[in-house]
């Protein structure tokens, strides 16, 4: 060991710093320019959404649902930088608040169903046998559902509300992480260190959480990142079609609903272009970041 | 191979049953009485109760499910609450229209994506490659309903080149050209995302193949670069792309819901969406089952295609 260290000192002039896996991944990620731009835009969008009440108060001074009765579907002006919608509400203000709703629904539901998926996948992959068989058949069934149509059906039957929308997302999405974790666990189960943990009498819970899950994290992180984009698109599509978040709560998706009116679509692009572009920008940044993460976490993919 | 396909087909039966049970529970978990519309608001409550009893709508859910399963298996999908028409008849009209749209969107995506992906991979890190990669990234990030709105705004309103919606010009006798003319905007809307995804996929797959030893061997033999790429590399590079055929099937039909709704294209997507809006039980059951069946068949198709095009894979 000493000899190796000395050789390295001779070769490089200095002793190499011990690098943890996390910092290696982080270094590889920061070298990917697109991923950094994506991450930066994403953080910026989150900050803007988070501080929407303050920003709008200072800049335009309108409330989220405040109606400016003499200005309905007004053109952009100093009073309303992006005009007003068909109820006379300030479009710029709602755009910022809309991000708050869209992003928080996507982030929170991804966190929750990832947790569900990880639990189900861990149990299936760790115990195997009939438990695995049963859980995986359930995964097969849920994955056979037409995603968008069943989400629409659930929300339509149970009534449009944020709770039902999130329920539909959770119900349909947990199988993907469950499959991922199970697949990883099937191979991890055979590793020596897992066997060692078991031999020392570690409980299944401890073995899973301390020894196996950390080694299955890489594909999960990539998947979770990209899934946030998918859920933002799904929420937007459902809200656009009128089966997601309903008025007066603004989301980027239901703001686009204005464009279903032919007059708005043809003559007032300032009403529907901004929310559409915000969805596009958000999803694009997430995809850049997720792609960068994938490369950083799995160096084998990069030549 | 034949045995494998048969076994997989048999495996789909319990999955479809599972799908139908969960679907039935979801569709019948509605608060309120969905049949109120059917009976009208002024029906005497006692008579309503009697009618519901007679139609079996007050039976326990398992009994209703078994009844649904029996009638469905006999080929009767029930009647639409709204239009009072048999669901089979409505679907028979809608499916061909959806096939036309999804088929042309699929071709549009594939025929553009493969050449673009291949050329981009052979010129990795060139300006063109960066342009393609960026465009593909943007394509997969663009929500379908937003690109549809932009398309309509520019190509149907601002410069009225194409019709805004519908499948044919009303009041005109049917002609192929008219159909194609109406098909263009929905096709681009529906195909754009897939095109971007296929491009990325083709490019990645080709890059992988171009690093293989047999490609180096082919080059070392002194073969022309054209032959190396289009004869040796492309064949293997397209294997994973072909499996996309199966996987993209459900995605295409899912996208059809949005595209058909925006362009009033009278297919399965529009039928499903109208049923969602009307809470039309029998139609919702039928369309959801139809799409679930497609998802399962798509996965099976992907596996079979994979085995067919890649002799290294053998199923037993």
Image (cartoon, grey):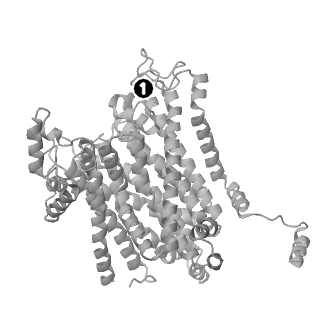
Q: Give whichever of B299, B152 is nearer the camera.
A: B299
Q: Is residue B199 above or below residue B138?
A: below
The residue at the far top in this view is A70
Find residue A62 and report its horizontal and vertical position in percent.
52, 21
How many marks do you count on the picture? 1
Q: Give whichever of B316, A205 is nearer the camera.
A: A205
Q: Is residue A61 left or right of residue A175?
A: right
Q: Is residue B126 above or below residue B166?
A: below
Find residue B10 and report its horizontal and vertical position in percent.
28, 76
Find residue B269 and report its horizontal and vertical position in percent.
28, 50
Disc 1: host chain: A
Look at the image and tell me in which quarter the C terminus of chain A lies: bottom right
Look at the image and tell me in which quarter the N terminus of chain A lies: bottom right
Q: Is residue A60 above or below residue B167?
A: above
Q: Is residue B269 left or right of residue B83?
A: right
Classed neighbour count for the residue bearing mark 1: other residues with Cα under 10 Å, few (<14), some (14–19), many (≥20): many
**Residue depicted at x 67% and y 52%:** A33
**Residue depicted at x 33% and y 31%:** A262
Find residue A58 and report its horizontal and vertical position in percent.
61, 23
- Which secondary structure lies at badge 1? loop
Q: Is residue B184 in view from this perspective?
A: no
Residue receiving disc 1? A85
Q: Give whichever of B288, A262 is nearer the camera.
A: B288
Q: Give whichever of A164, B314 is nearer the camera.
A: A164
């Amino acid at each position: 060991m000493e000899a190796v260290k000395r050789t390295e000192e001779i070769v490089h002039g200095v002793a190499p710093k011990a690098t943890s896996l996390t910092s290696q991944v982080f270094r590889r990620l920061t070298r990917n320019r697109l991923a950094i731009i994506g991450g930066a835009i994403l953080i910026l969008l989150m900050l803007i959404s988070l501080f929407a009440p303050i920003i709008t108060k200072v800049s335009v001074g309108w409330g989220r649902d405040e109606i400016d009765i003499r200005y309905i579907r007004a053109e952009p002006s100093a009073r309303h930088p992006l005009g007003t919608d068909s109820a006379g509400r300030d479009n710029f203000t709602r755009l910022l608040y809309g991000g708050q709703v869209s992003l928080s629904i996507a982030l929170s539901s991804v966190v929750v169903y990832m947790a569900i998926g990880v639990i189900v996948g861990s149990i299936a992959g760790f115990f195997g046998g009939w438990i695995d068989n049963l859980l995986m058949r359930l995964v097969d069934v849920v994955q056979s559902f037409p995603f968008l149509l069943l989400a629409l059906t659930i929300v339509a039957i149970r009534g449009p509300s944020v709770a039902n929308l999130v329920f539909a997302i959770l119900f349909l999405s947990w199988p993907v992480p469950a499959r991922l974790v199970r697949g990883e666990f099937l191979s991890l189960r055979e590793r020596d260190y897992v066997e060692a943990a078991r031999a020392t009498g570690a409980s299944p819970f401890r073995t899973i959480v301390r020894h196996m899950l950390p080694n299955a994290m890489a594909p999960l992180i990539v998947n979770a990142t990209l899934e946030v984009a998918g859920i933002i698109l799904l929420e937007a599509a459902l809200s656009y079609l009128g089966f997601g978040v309903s008025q007066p709560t603004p989301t980027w998706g239901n703001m686009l609903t204005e464009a279903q009116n032919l007059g708005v679509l043809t003559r007032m692009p300032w009403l529907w272009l901004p929310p559409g572009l915000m969805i596009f920008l958000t999803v694009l940044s997430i995809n850049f970041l997720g792609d960068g993460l994938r490369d950083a976490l799995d160096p084998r993919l990069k030549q | 191979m034949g045995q494998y396909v048969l076994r997989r087909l048999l495996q789909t039966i319990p999955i479809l049953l599972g799908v139908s049970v969960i679907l039935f529970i979801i569709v019948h978990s509605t608060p309120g009485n969905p049949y109120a519309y059917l009976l009208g608001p002024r029906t005497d409550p006692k008579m309503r109760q009697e009618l519901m009893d007679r139609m079996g709508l007050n039976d326990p859910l398992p009994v209703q499910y078994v009844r649904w399963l029996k009638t469905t298996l006999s080929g009767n999908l029930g009647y639409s609450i709204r239009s009072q028409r048999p669901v089979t008849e409505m679907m028979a009209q809608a499916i061909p229209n959806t096939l036309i749209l999804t088929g042309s969107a699929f071709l549009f995506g594939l025929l553009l994506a493969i050449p673009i992906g291949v050329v981009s991979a052979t010129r990795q890190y060139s300006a063109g490659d960066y342009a393609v990669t960026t465009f593909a990234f943007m394509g997969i990030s663009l929500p379908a309903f937003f690109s549809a709105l932009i398309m309509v705004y520019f190509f149907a309103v601002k410069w009225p080149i194409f019709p805004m919606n519908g499948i044919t010009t009303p009041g005109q006798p049917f002609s192929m050209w008219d159909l194609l003319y109406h098909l263009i905007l929905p096709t681009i809307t529906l195909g754009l995302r897939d095109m971007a995804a296929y491009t990325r996929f083709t490019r990645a797959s080709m890059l992988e193949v171009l690093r293989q030893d047999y490609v180096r061997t082919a080059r070392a033999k002194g073969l022309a670069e054209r032959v190396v790429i289009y004869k040796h590399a492309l064949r293997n590079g397209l294997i994973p792309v072909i499996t996309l055929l199966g996987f993209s099937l459900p995605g295409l039909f899912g996208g059809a819901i949005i595209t058909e709704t925006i362009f009033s294209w009278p297919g399965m997507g529009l039928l499903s969406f109208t049923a969602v809006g009307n809470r039309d039980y029998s139609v919702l059951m039928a369309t959801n089952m139809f799409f679930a069946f497609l998802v399962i068949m798509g996965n099976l198709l992907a596996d079979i295609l994979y085995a067919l095009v890649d002799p290294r894979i053998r199923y037993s």
